[in-house]
Image (cartoon, rainbow, N blue to C red):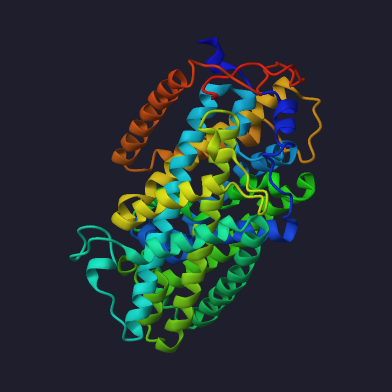
Amino acid sequence: MRKIFKKKCIHAALECAENDKTLKRSIGPAGLTIMGVGGIIGAGIFIVTGVASAASGPALMISFLVAAIACTFTALCYAEFASMIPIAGSVYTYTYITMGEIWAWIMGWIMILQYLIASAAVAIGWSSYVVAFLTSLGIALPAVISGPLGMQGSLINIPAVIIIIILTGVLIRGAQESARVNAIIVFIKIAVILLFITIGINYINPANYHPFMPYGISGIFTGAAMVFFAYLGFDAVASAAEETKDPGRTIPIGIIGSLIISSILYIAVAAIMTGMVPFNLLNNASPVAFALQYVGVKWAFTVITIGAIAGLTTVVLVNMFSKARIIFAMSRDGLLPKIFSSVNQDCKAPVASIVLVGGMAAVIAAFFSLDSIFELVNVGALSAFIFLALSVIILRRQQPDMKRSFKCPLVPAIPILSIIFCLALISQLKVHIIQIFIVWLVLGVIVYFVYGKYRGMFRSEDIAETDMGGFEPPMETPLSK
């Protein structure tokens, strides 16, 4: 049983990323920042603002600020680790190094759920905007193929499936091509958001800000727990660490820069939107477009809808990108079948992992509704951020003299604050969401041991354990083929 707590040596981890299963370093600081913005801005503005406004009212802008503060603490932790250990896997890899294999598996299992549900949930929102846009042009899609199972006579959400298939094809082209597509779409959606701010500020009705906190402080934190989903994306920057040029410099810029840009835009849009429309009317799948319709600005509806579609497209793209890299890293460590760590030598992309991600996301997006799944993303991400903060504290104690290109300030204070904020936000989530999450964790532990027995009861390859992070000859790790 001691082997399940075996840690991964940092030097061995870096070395395993320098073989034929490594990914190509092709993304610079601008591309990485744009990737972060592409992953963050989209669902938060174009979907979650409507749902969260029902919980926090006009104080939604404060909810975004609270969530941004929590994310800042986490972003500093990410920047330290990703610049120091620039390989695929994100928090899964960091946990493997600091806590051991069983905890790494649990972390990877959580992140698979997080990115899978995020991809599907945003694809569902994307479908809502596309259906509304086509309807405005006089093209009405049959209800049976344009919504989740059981909603208004629908059987399957075909538009959501189509966008996932298209983006799966983009990802297969490789990280550099994916980053280029992402950059083009990001510029479109930022231009549209700025247009909304310019138009909307002229239609603010101060009466809509009263009462400002209809549900008190608890409403602000409930809203913050919900809009935390909106900020997920800066963590995707860490998932691209193995494909980043000069990661010690580039990753901190990408993580922190994308978070600052997105926070400013989120708070501005939340303030204007709740000033345009009474908050109790915003609880729908396309709140930005609804706000414009409500104030009668019909000429801008089409432009804003196109921006929303663009914004949601990049969020789906970045989440699928991140999930494929988590599966790739777990497979390379022997915790998943080896086929998922194979790298296509032409595009330098983990094609099998990408296809798996696309297939699973398409199935969920085809049959589930947005409100039934998106909070699962929050509890998964918040749990990952707690493990990340703990990993920073542990490695600082174990290896205080190790070179760090970027150092999180005020350790352990900042990681501890990150943990406190994450726990506070988890406490605001619905009980049944936490119960579903616990069931997922239990299932993950069962899979770990069953798969381990199937693969030879904890044989291992390529992983070494050392208390000080030095390199030792490869030792056996559980679950390897």
Residue 425, can we see it? Answer: no
Q: In front here: 359 or 83? A: 359
Position above or below: 122 against 323: below
Horizontal side of 35 relative to 104 (left or right) equals: right
Residue occupying the point 70% across, 16% down: 466
Q: How many marks?
A: 0
| Location of residue 293 with respect to 50 vertically, above or below | below
Does 368 appear above or below 49?
Answer: above
The residue at 72%/55% (across/down) is 27
Q: Which picture quadrant has residue 161?
A: bottom left
Residue 323, image x, y percentages: 52, 46
On screen, residue 244 above or below 46: above
Q: Nearer the viewer, residue 162 or 100?
A: 162
- Give coordinates of residue 115: x percent, y percent: 48, 47
* Residue 427 in the image, given as x and y percentages of width and height: 39, 38
Q: Does residue 1 appear in this view?
A: yes
Residue 24 picture location, percent across and down: 72, 49
Most extreme residue toward the left, as rendered? 153
Q: Nearer the viewer, residue 377 or 283?
A: 377
Residue found at the very far bottom of the displayed protein:
299
Q: Quadrant of residue 330?
A: top right
- Quarter of the image with the C terminus is top right
Residue positioned 49% across, 83% down in the render: 202
| In this picture, residue 433 sits left or right of residue 424 | left
